[in-house]
Amino acid sequence: MTFQLIKDAILGKEQDFTVLSLKTAIMVLAIPMILEMMMESAFAVVDIFFVAKLGESAIATVGLTESVIVLVYAIGFGISMAATALISRRFGEKEYEKAGDSAFQLLLVGGSISVLLGLGGWFLAKDILQLMGAESDVLEIGVSYAKIIFAGNSAIMLLFLINGAFRGAGQPHLAMRALWIANGFNIVLDPLFIFGIGGWAGWGLDGAAIATTLGRGLGVLYQLYHLFNGKHKLHILTQNIKVRWKTIRKILDIAIGGMGQFLIDSVAWLALTRMNAEFGSAALAGYTIAMRVLIFTILPAWGLSGAAATLVGQNLGAKHVGRAEEAVWLTTKYNVIFMASVTGIYLLFSKQLAGFFTDIPEVQDIAAQGLWVIVLGYVFFAIGMVLTQAFNGAGDTKTPAWINIGVLWCIEVPLAWVLAFPLGFGFLGIFIAIAFAHSFHALVSLYFFKRGKWKRMAV
């Protein structure tokens, strides 16, 4: 039975998640979502693995650029939350043609925004890196890398939002496959484009940007094929290709909260990265490696949490409010078990994991400290992830945004600054602030979830 469920989850057998057993529903949804997020996290790990061989300046360039490109992730995340909320609600109501209408409007919104961001990033790449505190050696090799990443943000945006739509429709296998395709090409192209082959020397750091952008672009082509081929319940047909301003306004209303969540988180991350830059390229490189390694487990946990978003949205659409809440608690239980397990791995092998990415002793030590300290809050992270996804799946994206403002801006960033500078803990103080703030974030989310406003959201 379990093997058959895993097989159905990966192959993509369509299910009615408003009547399916919750344990079965979570497994069928979560397996491809976890695999999808593992592929997303592999992007970060693969890139930093190869880029680390180019030296400290290359690692620092990726860290600074990534700190800025997360603003694009924020917008993509916001629109993907709108996609999941709208599509899951329509599927719960069995309004499949309206789901297709929403999907086309999502493409219009995300595509338009990404073009504007790409133009701005291309022309302002050097100014952005300077603003982030890049040293001269980083600027020398990093401007062209940043230009390529910024200009290629459409691939990031569309990959995010279309996968959000697939998850809302209960088709996470398509989202998973898109990431597998994108990451598969990235793994092959990264070393080839960075180091070359035969008599060709490759493009160095720029090659990493080209490989990542091209890989994501191929994943988007796969997504678009399945959206427009008419073979799935979620599809865009000729009658859906029409501008519908009412739907666009609803997308923007929900997306603003989702964007706010990630933007607030991203600005906090920018601030923390900027603080780390004060301690030199070694500290920045160690911080970057630690974050990349942590993402490798945080994103799969986020994928498991995504099952809650789909189940909440579809069951609220079907008027099964109690079932929606039960799904959240069950998903939380599974996520806590997962994050508790990986905590032990990080505590025991933080030095070895850091050493896998760099043999520079100082950078390795800093990365290992970051891993050891931050995972102390992992169990709380697990709870916060599921509750945030539950809010988002219900279309209540603004509550998590306000929580982020209160916890990340008013607690995490000031605490990190006090610990790092006045109290003299340095980069270790920043790691401590991250662990504390995200643990407290989970407790605040739990309080607001129990108040139940999310149950009454109209989408």
Image: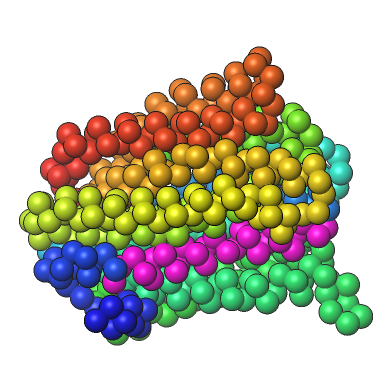
Q: Is residue 234 left or right of residue 442?
A: left
Q: Is residue 61 left or right of residue 18?
A: right
Q: Work out whether residue 124 or residue 129 is closer to the camera in this orientation and state it.
A: 129
Residue 133 magenta-drawn?
Answer: no
Residue at horizontal 61%, vertical 21%? 419
Above/below status of 24 relative to 54 = below
Q: Is residue 146 left or right of residue 243?
A: right
Q: Position of residue 248 (x, y in %)?
A: 31, 53
Q: Position of residue 24 (x, y in %)?
A: 22, 70
For the rendered model, the colour scheme is rainbow
Q: In this view of the protein, can residue 273 be seen by the observer? A: yes
Q: Position of residue 82 (x, y in %)?
A: 32, 53
Residue 45 magenta-drawn?
Answer: yes
Q: Which residues are magenta?
A: 28-54
Q: How many marks?
A: 0
Furthest residue in direction top, as rendered: 422
Residue at horizontal 82%, vertical 67%? 203
Residue at horizontal 15%, vertical 59%? 315
Furthest residue in direction right, as rendered: 199
